[in-house]
Amino acid sequence: MLESSSVAEWQLIGQLVEDLQQLPDVHAHLHEGETSNQGSTDHDAQIDLRVAGKDFVLLIEAKRAVYPRDAREVVWHFRELRHGDTNDHGGERLRLLIAESISPGAKELLREERVGYYDSGGSLYLPAPEAYLYIDKPPPKALEKSARSLFSGRRAQVLHALLMQHRDWFGVKDVADRAMVSPSTASQVMTELDRFDWVKSRGQGPTKERQLIEPAALLDTWAKQVAASRPPKLRRYFVPAAKAEMLPALFDEACELNDAMYAVTHEAAAQRYSPFLSSVSQVRARLWMGPNAQAALGSLDARIVSEGANLSILAVSSPGELLFRERVDGVTLASPVQVYLDLLQGEGRAKEMAEHLRREKIDF
């Protein structure tokens, strides 16, 4: 139940009423008896609604944030209450969940179960008999910010570790070591994944372990974040006297001699993992920048250019951005997951190649 101090929730209820009133042939107002904490009721607020001459009573349950696990609990709770939602003098009673943010997965689950919802971004789903309402708007900024933080920086390294070894069980310290992050960062990420129902757990306390059970859902969501993000800046070089097919090996040799940490990515890496194109004209690589990296590029006589590049460098700031590299045909490649994500920000046939790589090499 809402407490009288839950100002944000009451503001959201007021926003819902305003949004409903702006719809054609819709009238809505907050029931006068529901403007303060009603400890004896099974709902947080009541809205009297008329749509095209038909009357309804919306019984509101408010939450701050809703993820799939929360959505399932709401569905079960609404089912238990449904037997009491009989028609009365106020019109047909309908249950509606409102929250500041509702994750895409939670929205999908609620629609499948025909449970109405509303969020602070203005998305509305109300499957009322003879008055179906559905408005889909971009997620509220709070949810977008939360998603971006999960799929970036050191948190992304935890996701990377889980995807690459998704059949393994992990304790917090174990996944922190594999992802090269602090245990607190690993714990925060695992808690978020719990909320999405993407992991299952066993044990308790310090011995608690988790296993990723929805790798495809996690990678799909990460891919959407990447596709919606601005591509990283690349440093473009031209390496003279280097044929395209020989450049990966030459680059590898230069990095090995100068102890520079790198991983070939994009088309040149995908082609080695699972051939798709007849040829690749440019090598793109992740390179941990520093004196060793500059020495490697110098030994190749690589020259910065604005066009006509055959080598493009994505500068990384830590070894954590080069996790799970693989050695294939004498060249160090970024992990298949990393190559897939990098390709999603490419041009030309990069996205086709990404899907081919995911289907043939990643397989989830």
Image: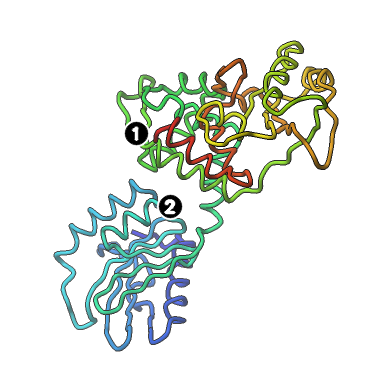
Q: Is residue 171 shown above or below 46? A: above
Query: Looking at this view, is 145 or 58 the one in front?
Result: 145
**Quadrant holding the C terminus:** top left
**For the residue carrying disc 1, how many other residues have a C-alpha within 10 Å: few (<14), some (14-19), or many (20+)?**
some
What residue is shown with label 2? 103
Instruction: State the residue position of label 1.
Output: 213
Q: Which sits in the foreground, 332 or 50?
A: 332
Residue occupying image coordinates x 54% and y 52%: 144
Q: Position of residue 351 (x, y in %)?
A: 55, 45
Residue type at numbered disc 1: Ile
Q: Residue at x 32, y 87 (%)?
A: 52
Residue 335 at x, y = what percent? Answer: 54, 26
Look at 61% across and 25% down and name the residue there: 322
The structure residue drawn at horizontal position 85% and vertical position 30%, both measured from the top left corner, is 303
Residue 214 appears in which quarter of the rendering?
A: top left
Instruction: Reply above or below: 345 against 364.
Output: below
Q: Is residue 266 left or right of residue 364?
A: right
Which numbered disc, 1 or 2, marks the residue that appears first in the sequence? 2
